[in-house]
Amino acid sequence: MKEISLNDLRKLPEGSYRLIDVRDEALASYGMLPGAIHIDMEELEKEDSAAIGDIPQDKTIILYCQIGKKTREAEELPALNGREYYGLEGGYMGYLQDELAHMEEGGEKQKKAEMSIRKKYHKQLFSRFAKACKTYKLINEGDHIAVCISGGKDSMLMAKLFQEIQTHRQVKFDVTFLVMDPGYNKENRQLIESNAKALGIPITIFESNIFDSVDNIEKSPCYICARMRRGFLYSKAKELGCNKIALGHHYDDVIETILMGMLQGGQIQTMMPKLHSTNFEGMELIRPMYFIRESDICAWRDYNELHFLQCACHFTETCSTCHTDGTTSSKRLETKKLIERLKKDNPFVESNIFRSVENVQLNTIIEYKKDGVRHNFLDEY
């Protein structure tokens, strides 16, 4: 496919072209180029595509994927026959690199992001962050917390929320903003560093070779990668004198995990707000974004015109994705869509899923396990 550079794209007359994001739907949900629409590549392989038919014939079509590889290698696309179209050189990542190159350390991006946490999104973000910390006793006097940053929207916002709560000085604790480089390519690592610099987050980076280790694993590579990353983070945090690591899982992650456990794993379990490490004595994992909705995180991101990574592993080079808890985007996205469908008939379905693991009636459970020991209702019948 013929390509167009970002500089040449900017020279085109405003309104003369239409941007189309052809990445995985989960990747696109984490941010698109301004004014772009999302259309799956499979849709473009149809001769009669309604989505393309809605675009006026006089519009030049610009397709982009994650790094430009997918569009560059694409053969003829039947839906675009007779249309003028190009692939965007460098893809979405090329656009982000160009945007971040113009950001200033401690500049307007940082000031606007911090002010929006204090004002516009205070109730949705900071209040819920503080509520989770208080409800589950996540932050204690004298703690040294490793705030683990993956480069995505959730962990970057979590870092800013930790900075904000420290200014309130209700509890004295220390933080280290910890970034593990498990084998990022140059562009992905630079994106994390640029975002941290622009938002005023002083990160500590250490390296591992996790991506290389899991590249050849065929069964559950995302799950194994997540477990390995967790272990490396615990180890480095302890080395730095921390007693806790903080992860950026939010409310939607929690309810999706509950439902996925039932539908995919045949078990009832949840993502706990805090856990003692079984392998690293004295270490604890906390999730202070437990009450924050993903839609509010996205709203904060878009209001501040920020662009983050979803997953920076090698799989993103082919525009597929994984998650920090080891699940693949397809399964989690499938569960997310199921919840959306259920919500149309029952607006309380999300809170009901969340509350279901707070209201377990053991007298109505056939079997349950505690500390690895299985208990059956017949034991006390």
Image (cartoon, rainbow, N blue to C red):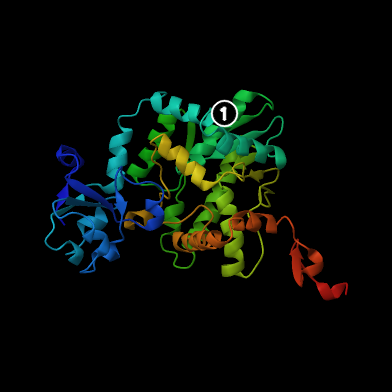
**Residue type at mark 1?**
Glu
Q: Is residue 348 left or right of residue 73?
A: right
User: Percent position (x, y) of residue 364?
Assistant: 78, 69
In the image, 282 versus 52, the foreground residue is 52
Q: Is residue 273 left or right of residue 252?
A: right
Whether residue 201 appears in this view of the structure is no
Tag 1: Cα neighbours inside 10 Å, few (<14), some, or many (≥20)? some
Query: Farthest residue toward the front?
Result: 345
Residue positioned 58% across, 32% down in the render: 162
Query: Farthest residue toward the right?
Result: 380
* Residue identifier under label 1: 164
In the image, 233 versus 112, the foreground residue is 112
Where is 103 relative to 9, above or below?
A: above
User: Percent position (x, y) of residue 135?
Assistant: 71, 41
How many marks do you count on the picture? 1
Residue positioned 36% across, 54% down in the render: 316
Quarter of the figure with the N terminus: bottom left
Whether residue 28 appears in this view of the structure is yes
Residue positioned 41% across, 39% down in the render: 302
**SS at mark 1?**
helix
Where is 370 relative to 15, above or below?
A: below
User: Percent position (x, y) of residue 349?
Assistant: 60, 58
User: Percent position (x, y) of residue 158?
Assistant: 54, 38
Q: Is residue 209 left or right of residue 238?
A: left
Quarter of the figure with the C terminus: bottom right
